[in-house]
Image: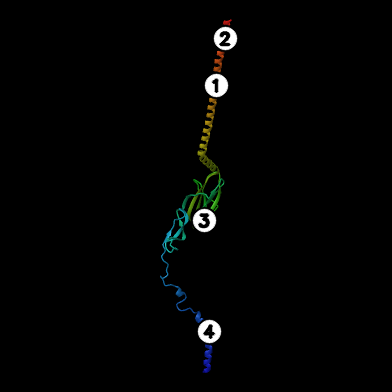
Amino acid sequence: MAVWLCSEALLFLLLAPPLTALQDMEPPLGSGDESEQAEPGLNAPEPTALIFGECTVTCGIGIQEVQSTSGCPGKEEKCIVGVKECRGPANCGWGRPISENSTNVMMSCIYISPENRFRYVWKILIPGKPARMLSDDSAIVVVRRGMRSVTYQCETRENGSKIASVKYAVNATTGLKIKKAKGNVKEHDPRRGRADAILIFSVVTAVLLTIVVIIIVILIILHWVLVKAGLESKYGQGDKYKKLTDRSSVNTLE
């Protein structure tokens, strides 16, 4: 009996450390996932009032800000919490090229990032005839000017539906030169006309003043010549009369 008790005590001493370690590893009652899960409604977030800003476009596809009126940091009444997609009418009318020169025109379809999300269809619109499709299906194309003006149109499609459409008028090379020439005339006409008028007025005034001065000088010279001639004739006749008088006096004395 004593031997059995000793063996039991020895076994208990040997197994005590592992049992104690296992007890330490066991989670206490009420801990773990059950303790982390709060009762419904206690930590539920407050209801958030969202305000949607204006769309960045008036047609096609764009984005708009999403603002919140609660839960903002500090004392801010509103704060931006994200952005969302927005859309307007598909027809965007006439667009403005990205860049253009006398030979090339760069045009862009309507899209938002990512660019490869959409499909782009470029067309040449011909009055009274079906539109001609272009092989280029990229969002941005560069075309060369021709001898005739051409109207291009790009349709932005997604899942088979048109979400935006824009047209571009590409003037011909000759028409562009005429337009530029007219523009230059309009721009320079007021300034150049005023400068020409001032120049003409100055030249005419200078010519008239020169003519007047010449006439005055001629008149002065003529007047001086006439006066001199009159004086000479007057003094000349007096001398002749005096000589005759002197001769007659001499004859009388003799």
Q: CA distance from mark 1 to mark 3?
A: 99 Å
Tell me the amino acid under the disc marked 3.
Answer: Arg
Residue labelled with disc 1: 224
Residue 76, image x, y percentages: 43, 61
Tell me the amino acid under the disc marked 4.
Answer: Pro
Tell me the amino acid under the disc marked 1.
Answer: Trp
Q: Is residue 27 above or below residue 231?
A: below
Residue labelled with disc 4: 17
Tell me the amino acid under the disc marked 2.
Answer: Asp
Q: Secondary structure at mark 2?
A: helix
Residue labelled with disc 3: 119
**Circle on res. 246:** 2
Specify the color scheme.
Answer: rainbow
Going by the image, does 76 lie left or right of 173? left
Nearer the camera: disc 4 or disc 2: 2
**Circle on res. 96:** none
Q: Residue furthest toward the front? A: 253
Q: CA distance from mark 2 to mark 1?
A: 33 Å
Q: Is residue 3 above or below residue 54?
A: below
Q: Secondary structure at mark 4?
A: helix
The tag earlier along the polypeptide, 4 or 3, is 4
Q: Is the residue marked by circle 4 packed among few (<14), some (14-19), or many (20+) residues within 10 Å?
A: few
- Residue at x 49%, y 51% (from the top left corner): 166
Q: Residue furthest toward the bottom? A: 1
Q: Secondary structure at mark 3?
A: strand
Nearer the camera: disc 2 or disc 3: 2
Q: Is residue 221 above or below residue 251?
A: below
Q: Quick one: 157 or 217, which is closer to the camera?
A: 217
